């Protein structure tokens, strides 16, 4: 009863308290809005104005993507196994794909290092981050991840438009290839990645995707491993019409072709051996998930469907 009487007898006090609370609320809203505005402007400015001028790429396919995006003048160093395009020869080297050197990277004073997502490079990436060096880590194990990698690099290097154009060009080339191979037979293919011991590409690999786009069928069914080791029994129960081997090491492809033909001569009952359809192909074209991949896929398509191509297939393809 007393509190009720006070509220009735002192309306001015009640109004003053309400006004004070309202004023505090307004001030809080204004301050919060100002903070958000400052942060928003700062973030927007960072995204628009930061232009990494000293970029390092730690794998051959990342290097190819960066060059294809027109970043040649901003690429300071690359992995020692980066060999395409020819301009890479003028770039400093900071260790190999499997063994990048943190010390050599730091010495280049980069403002962006692009790495892949596996153990050896992840360790280097964490060391660089602790030193305040910007790092972009990319997982690139499938064709779709390659497309996304191009866009990620485009964002990080402030060249999004070039990245979108590069992806669109890639998609257009694949679409044209699919159209060209419509209504064709699909030969059964064995893709060999190693002969001693014999190891092949399974269904859960980007190589399987390449075969599908190129109009072929992987003779290897579902397996636990992506690249399983197989024996004679699997070869005989899954006879291939075509055998494709990706070149390995520094030996000339022509020499590896001769060695492959000699190796497979021990399996004379295989359709591919009988027909002489054994091909060694350039690994850089078909195993690097980069902008040259459409060229690699068309190479495989020309092997599987020579009738669709005017030129004669050979081992150099």
Image (tube, rainbow, N blue to C red):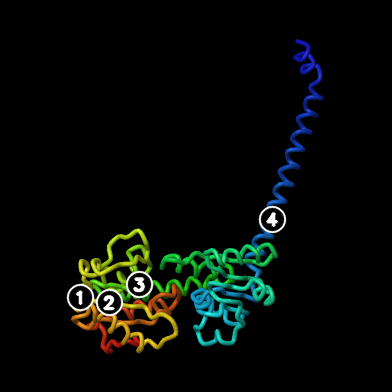
Q: Determine which residue is flagged by label 4.
A: 39
Disc 3/disc 4 C-alpha distance (Å): 58 Å
Does residue 208 lie above or below 67 as drawn? above
x and y percentages locating residue 155 in the rendered image: 56, 67
Q: Are marks 2 and 4 in contact (CB under 8 Å)?
A: no
Taking the image as shown, residue 283 lies to the left or right of residue 43, namely left
First-in-chain label (2 vs 1): 2
Coordinates of residue 249 in the picture (x, y in percent) = 43, 81
User: Which residue is tagged 2?
Assistant: 243
Seen from the viewer's position, the closer of residues 111 and 183 is 111
Label 3 vs 4, first from the N-terminus: 4
Mark number, residue 282: none
Contact flag, marks 4 and 1 (Cβ < 8 Å): no
* Mark carried by residue 197: 3
Which residue is labeled 1 in the image?
270
User: Which residue is rendered at x = 34% and y = 70% of the image?
Assistant: 199
Alpha carbon of mark 2 to alpha carbon of mark 3: how far? 16 Å
State which tag comes first along the sequence, 2 or 4: 4
SS class, disc 3: loop
Looking at the figure, which quarter contains the C terminus?
A: bottom left
Q: Can you tell which quarter of the image residue 226 is in?
A: bottom left
């Amino acid at each position: 009863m007393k509190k009720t009487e006070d509220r009735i007898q002192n309306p001015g006090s009640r109004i003053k308290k309400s006004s004070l609370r309202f004023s505090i609320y307004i001030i809080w809203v204004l301050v919060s809005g100002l903070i958000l505005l400052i942060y928003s402007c700062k973030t927007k400015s960072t995204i628009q104005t930061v232009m990494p001028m000293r970029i390092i790429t730690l794998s051959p396919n990342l290097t190819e993507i960066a060059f294809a995006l027109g970043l040649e003048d901003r690429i300071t160093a690359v992995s020692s196994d980066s060999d395409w395009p020819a301009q890479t020869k003028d770039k400093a080297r900071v260790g190999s794909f499997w063994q990048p050197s943190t010390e050599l990277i730091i010495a280049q004073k980069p403002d962006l290092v692009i790495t892949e997502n596996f153990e050896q490079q992840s360790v280097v990436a964490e060391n660089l981050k602790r030193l305040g060096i910007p790092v972009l880590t990319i997982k690139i194990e499938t064709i779709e991840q390659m497309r996304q990698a191009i866009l990620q690099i485009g964002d990080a290097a402030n060249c999004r438009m070039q990245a979108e154009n590069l992806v669109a060009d890639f998609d257009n080339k694949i679409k044209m290839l699919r159209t060209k191979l419509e209504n064709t037979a699909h030969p059964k293919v064995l893709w060999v990645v190693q002969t001693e011991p014999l190891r092949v590409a399974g269904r859960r690999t980007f190589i399987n995707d390449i075969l599908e786009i190129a109009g072929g069928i992987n003779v290897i069914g579902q397996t636990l491993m992506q690249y399983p080791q197989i024996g004679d029994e699997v070869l005989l129960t899954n006879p291939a019409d075509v055998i494709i081997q990706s070149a390995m090491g520094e030996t000339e492809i022509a020499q590896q072709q001769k060695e492959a033909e000699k190796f497979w001569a021990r399996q004379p009952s295989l359709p591919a051996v009988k027909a002489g359809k054994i091909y060694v192909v350039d690994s850089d074209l078909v195993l690097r998930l980069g902008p040259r991949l459409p060229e690699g896929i068309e190479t495989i398509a020309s092997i599987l469907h020579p009738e669709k191509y005017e030129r004669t297939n050979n081992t150099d393809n």
